[in-house]
Image: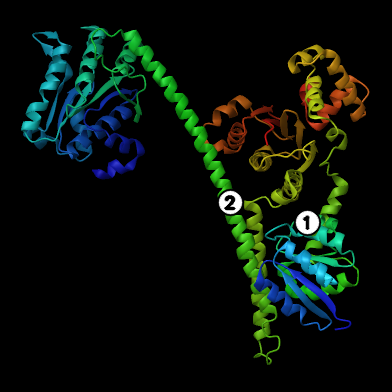
Amino acid sequence: MSAHRQNSEWEQRLWGLRPGAHVCFLFESEQEHRALTAAFMRHGLERHEKLLCLTEAHGAEQIRAYLDADGVQVGPREQSGQIRILPAERFARRGGAVDLKGMAARVQAEIGPARAQGYSGLRIAIEMSRRFAEQPGPERLVEAESALDAWLPGSGCLALCQYDRRRFDAPLLLGVLEAHPLAAIGTELYDNFYHMPPRTVAAADPAVVKLNSWIGHLRERQRSETQIRTLTRKLMQTQEDERCLISRELHDRVGQDLSTIRLSLETLFDGLPPAAAGTGAKVGALSGLLDRSIRAIRDLAYDLRPPGLDEMGIVPAMATVCDEFFEKTGIHVDYRFAGIEALTLDVDTQINLYRMLQEGLNNIYKHAAATEAVVKLTAAHPNILLRIEDNGIGFDVEKRAREMDSEKRMGLRSLQERTALLGGVMIVASTPGRGTRILIKLPRRG
Amino acid sequence: MAGRQSILIVDDHALFREGLKAIISRNPAYEVVGEAGRGDEALQLAAALRPKLVLVDISLPDQTGIELTRQLRKRLPQTRVMMVTMHSKVDYIVKAFQAGATGFVTKESAAERLLQAIEFVLRGEYFMDSAMSQKVVQKLAGLNVAPRSTRDPDYESLTVREQEILALLAEGQSLRTIGERLFISPKTVENHRTSIMRKLGVHSSFELIRYAAKVGIIDIDRWKE
């Protein structure tokens, strides 16, 4: 059974649910319902919890079939009382009428006996009946959920409340969603920031509670975004530092040592009696091998860290990138620098400009099918402008912007990130068939 | 001693210096008279020893070998300088020759080419690693196709204020708007414009905009539409 748990990330998250959890499960298909509900129940059984399963459209037989298919011996466990499956409506009905308040109370009453029987807790899986929303009505249903929500923390129970999105209307689902600290959509589990904490003071104005909660979420979101930005910056900085370190070690240490060996090998037999036949040829072969290693190390070091950026400055280094790009790809780059040589740019800006050019050209090579590119780097006080343009196939900018969220479009995204890190803006203009023009506008620093 | 050509070696790797000395000692016409691991040391030694030739590594602890070359050439015009370095980028070669070096050998070629290179350089000729020279020629050949416009003296002669105003003018903003934005009078903006146009050698607003598009201040396509 545990094999299922390791199968997928969502199931691992579901396994992480602890007593007190109150999950609003919105599903739209039988597969979704089955996957999450079956896993939820199975996890409880594995933890030796008692399982109370209240059914609706998916009847008791279907639930048994889910568990059976997952290798759970349902019959014996029902006989022992670990699993209790019954229709939600029957559980809710008292004296002919549906009594949701009573139902919540009866659910709560189950934990005592479960503990007495030696179970580690109580796990409740409820499929909500659509009739609850008609009679006694949506307000009562939300109230019952709120009652559960107030009771669950510290109760030793956890509940999965299942709502078929195809059967409930949106206003009801909105209300219900607010009563759950956790939400499962399909099989994904989310911290529900629309959750409205149960009213601790009966008199508290719901609008005030909601407003405070929303303000809290706005702040939290802002904080997360700042945090992501900080982390991204740190990540890029770390990557750059590491590259620099490795490059320097390779070039200045490994390469130097290999060169020294190569040189010493040459004169190894100077002044000594003639060596055995064939030694010269062997030394020659070794020297050839060393030459190759030295060249490989140097190329790698140059790839990792732009050579000359420190000694010669940004302009020759970027011009070299353009020249080498042409040599490598055959795409001609017409470049022009204006006013940059006269500036003193901080190292951060330099290295980022350099990387942006590399990334921009790389995008052209990989995606644009272009024959010509134009690069312009201009100091236009108080900004620095970097233009990277091509005559390639272009693309639909809006569509690409949406795709940027999927990780495939790392090129543009990474340009965007670097631009943002330097406090600049990036403008992408492209028309399918008519090339692409990227403008990166950075505030001058340093 | 007479007739032996004196050589100073500047490299911060002692073992590599040993290797160079071993190679050089193969030719009795040369004599290594000194070694230095740093640029400042090298300058002192060179002044005292007045060697015929200095072998210089580009990466030194206290300054670049290119800077050292410039200093050596200035102070000891009779002394020749040759780079012996890990670096192989064309830009380094160009910079080294511009600084006054007359030879360039990569470290891995030193075993085979050093003596030949020394001979050339001491004779007053230039020497470039044959592995490198191919790249340099390619680069030079490339120059005819695409002139390297890495500098724009006209544009660089603009003050930052003028750069700022040129950008705003190119965007089509009026003298008055620009003045309001920069807290100066329209008259001052106009003076700046006159100065900008004189420095850039343009004679009309149209030419000014065309120039701005050329150097990348505004987008030519947007301007065309």
Could you give the CA–CA distance between mark 2 and mark 1, rounded to whole angstroms? 26 Å
Instruction: Pick out the residue farthest to the bottom.
Output: A273
Disc assigned to residue B89: none
The residue under label 2 is which amino acid type?
Arg
Residue B35, located in which quarter of the rendered image? bottom right
For disc 1, the marked residue is B67
Screen quadrant of the N terminus of chain A: top left
Residue B63 x %, y %: 72, 57
Q: Are marks 2 and 1 in contact (CB under 8 Å)?
A: no
> In the rendered image, is residue A19 in sight?
yes
The residue under label 1 is which amino acid type?
Glu
Screen quadrant of the C terminus of chain A: top right
Residue A89 x %, y %: 16, 15
Residue B172, located in which quarter of the rendered image? top right
Q: Is residue B77 left or right of residue A332?
A: right
Residue A308 x %, y %: 72, 51
Most foreground residue, B212 or B39: B39
Disc assigned to residue A243: 2
Image point 78% across, 40% down: which residue?
A341
- Above or below residue B108? Residue B209 is above
Q: Is residue A202 left or right of residue A309?
A: left
Determine whether the residue tagged by mark 2 lies in a helix, strand or loop. Answer: helix
Residue A254 x %, y %: 60, 65
Please state the total of marks drawn on the protein image: 2
Q: Nearer the viewer, mark 2 or mark 1?
A: 1
Circle 2 Cα neighbour tier, 10 Å, few/some/many (<14 / 14–19 / ≥20): some
- Above or below residue A238? Residue B112 is below
> In the rendered image, is residue A288 in sight?
no
- Above or below residue B197? Residue A297 is below
- Above or below residue A260? Residue A163 is above
Most foreground residue, A113 or A221: A221
Image point 64% across, 61% down: which residue?
A252
